[in-house]
């Protein structure tokens, strides 16, 4: 028997906003992913299953074929690089912006080479390099907003939605690096070997995205 078509999702806002789209496409998990600790979730369709992974791991699972399809933020995809992946549908969910931010009012600006704290080291490196600006990049895994407050960094590169997190910490956005939404991604090999199933899923999700929400 062939493996069920495997779809990688991450818990949190992606799961919350993606499940309604899959439900519209007729696919629903058999157990509630929020309360279950299972990592493989069968669905009402025997030929389709979900797997639950960390948000930043979704492209890796899909790239190497651990999953055929996935849902990932554009931020995560840009940082990953997109090797081995197609990105056929913009789901329009989890919209935010990847921004350069720092102390409100500029904070006097850095003396010498700026230090930038971020979990997006590849995007940050490429963005500054494209402008010929030399910065030192410090890798963090979360709570980037703290870094300028304690002198770890001059600036941060992080996601901004309402701006509340920046404001609450005396910071402000300076420049937009990328507009972010979540995307449906597909393993390039699966697109060939399981074309009918993968195409069917892309079309169904595309229709769910286009359908008016009540
Ligand atoms: P983990 O919890 O595994 O560390 P994470 O914190 O990156 O992962 P989420 O916070 O669920 O996971 O974010 C998943 C995706 O949602 C991000 O990659 C981004 O595309 C989007 N996102 C993150 N923060 C916001 C936000 N405040 N508003 C809208 N979208 C967001
Ligand atoms: C995200 C992001 C920012 C915040 C921005 O964090 O890393 O800290 O949202 O949103 P805002 O502009 O509306 O305040 P999230 O809430 O996902 O926390 P986490 O990354 O620590 O899970």
Image (spheres, rainbow, N blue to C red):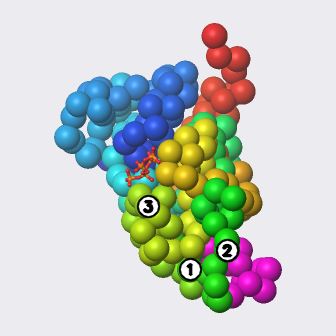
Q: Position of residue 198 (x, y in %)?
A: 57, 45
Task: Please tell me whether the stretch drawn in magenta is mainly helix, strand or loop.
Answer: helix
- Tell me, yes or no, whether the highlighted magenta stretch contains residue 132: yes
Residue at image position (37%, 54%) is 54
Residue 189 magenta: no
The local secondary structure at tag 3 comes to helix
Q: Which residue is mark 2?
A: 109
* Label 3 to label 1: alpha-carbon separation: 14 Å
Q: SS at mark 2?
A: loop
Q: CA distance from mark 2 to mark 3?
A: 17 Å
For the view shown, which residue lies furthest in the front direction? Answer: 108
Relative to 209, residue 157 above or below: below
Specify which label sits upstream in the sequence, 1 or 2: 2
Q: Marks 1 and 2, how far apart in space?
A: 11 Å
The answer to whether 95 is drawn above or below residue 130 in the figure is: above
Q: Which residue is mark 1?
A: 115
Report the span colored magenta.
122-135
Viewport quadrant of the C terminus: top right
């Amino acid at each position: 028997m062939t493996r069920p078509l495997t779809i990688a999702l991450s818990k949190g806002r992606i799961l919350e906003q993606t499940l309604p789209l899959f439900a519209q496409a007729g696919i629903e998990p058999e157990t509630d992913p929020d309360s279950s600790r299972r990592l493989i979730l069968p669905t009402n369709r025997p030929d389709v299953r979900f797997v639950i992974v960390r948000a930043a791991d979704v492209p890796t699972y899909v790239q190497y074929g651990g999953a055929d399809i996935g849902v990932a933020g554009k931020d995560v995809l840009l940082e990953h690089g997109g090797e081995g992946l197609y990105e056929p549908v913009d789901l329009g969910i989890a919209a935010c912006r990847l921004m350069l931010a720092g102390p409100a009012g500029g904070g006097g600006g850095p003396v010498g080479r700026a230090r930038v704290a971020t979990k997006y080291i590849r995007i940050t490196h490429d963005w500054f390099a494209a402008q010929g600006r030399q910065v030192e990049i410090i890798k963090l895994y979360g709570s980037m907003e703290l870094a300028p407050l304690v002198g770890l960094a001059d600036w941060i590169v992080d996601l901004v939605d309402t701006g509340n997190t920046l404001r609450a910490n005396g910071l402000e956005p300076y420049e937009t690096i990328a507009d972010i939404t979540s995307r449906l991604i597909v393993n390039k090999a699966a697109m060939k070997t399981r074309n009918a199933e993968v195409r069917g899923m892309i079309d169904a999700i595309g229709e769910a995205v286009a359908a008016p929400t009540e």
